[in-house]
Amino acid sequence: MSDSDDNGLSRRQVLALGGGLVVLGSAPVSTLAAPHDKGADESPVRRTVTSTVAFVVNGRRRELELDNRTSLLDAMREHLHLTGSKKGCDQGQCGACTMIVDGQRINSCLTLAIMHQDAEITTIEGLGTTESLHPLQAAFVKHDGYQCGYCTPGQICSAVSVLDEIKRGIPSHVSGDITAPPQLTSNELRERMSGNICRCGAYSNIIEAITEVAGERA
């Protein structure tokens, strides 16, 4: 048997060449790249750009210096330590991060803090205190509208907004007549609260809590 391949290389030469390629393949990418300027590390991917953001949070003006990529949820939780709003799916599907911004409920994980300059923001901490609960907080306690409680802050913030929508006559997808005042029915409340998921399954109790408060406000 010949010790050479079709190219005339000996077995020893082939092995040596293969070993060299392995060493080359394991070398750091930086050693293989073409020479570049020192400023190359300051590319948009690596560089952190910050902005000063100010808003009114739970009635108090707050100002933060934030990475422009910071979500509103992370600004509240990580920088202002308002941890009532929860990070659930972080994709805007579960509603655990719901806050009220300029009178409208939003999924705070899907929006950047810098987009809300001078906005009025209400988190669960701004609705009531342990000494003086918001009516919806009290109703959730009364009707056991929670089990683990993880989704509850978002549920309550969303419910506050739902009652405001009904009061203002804003129809939903299940409203039979969009020109008439919305009816406070179970179907209406379930549709309007459908963006807030409760994995414990306390939905019927949540509806009872909202219905009670809505009746008191009528």
Image: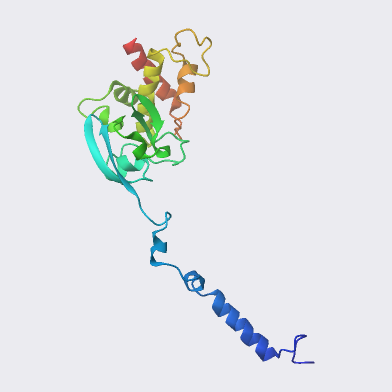
Q: Is residue 213 among what the camera can see?
A: yes
Find residue 85 and report its horizontal and vertical position in percent.
Answer: 34, 36
**Quick check: 114 above or below 146?**
below
The residue at 39%/59% (across/down) is 42
Residue positioned 48% across, 27% down in the render:
194
Q: Is residue 75 above or below residue 12?
A: above
Q: Is residue 48 above or below residue 132?
A: below
Q: Give the quadrant of residue 3.
A: bottom right
Q: State left or right for residue 168 relative to residue 188.
A: left
Q: Single out the residue that lies furthest toward the right.
A: 1
**Outermost top residue:** 180
- Residue sitting nearer the eye, 3 or 114: 114
Spot occupied by residue 167 in the image (x, y as percentages of width and height): 38, 13
Q: Position of residue 218 (x, y in %)?
A: 34, 9
Relative to residue 169, is residue 46 depicted above or below? Answer: below
Q: Is residue 80 visible?
A: no
Residue toward you, 210 or 122: 122
Q: Splitting the image into 4 quarters, where does residue 16 fall?
A: bottom right
Horizontal placement of 5 versus 164: left or right?
right
The residue depicted at 32 percent of the width and 48 percent of the height is: 50
Task: Report the residue that reaches farthest toward the front.
Answer: 37
Residue drawn at x 35%, y 22% as measured from the top left: 160
Chosen colour scheme: rainbow
Q: x, y percentage for residue 210? A: 38, 20
**Picture quarter with the N terminus:** bottom right
Task: Please count the marks in the image.
Answer: 0
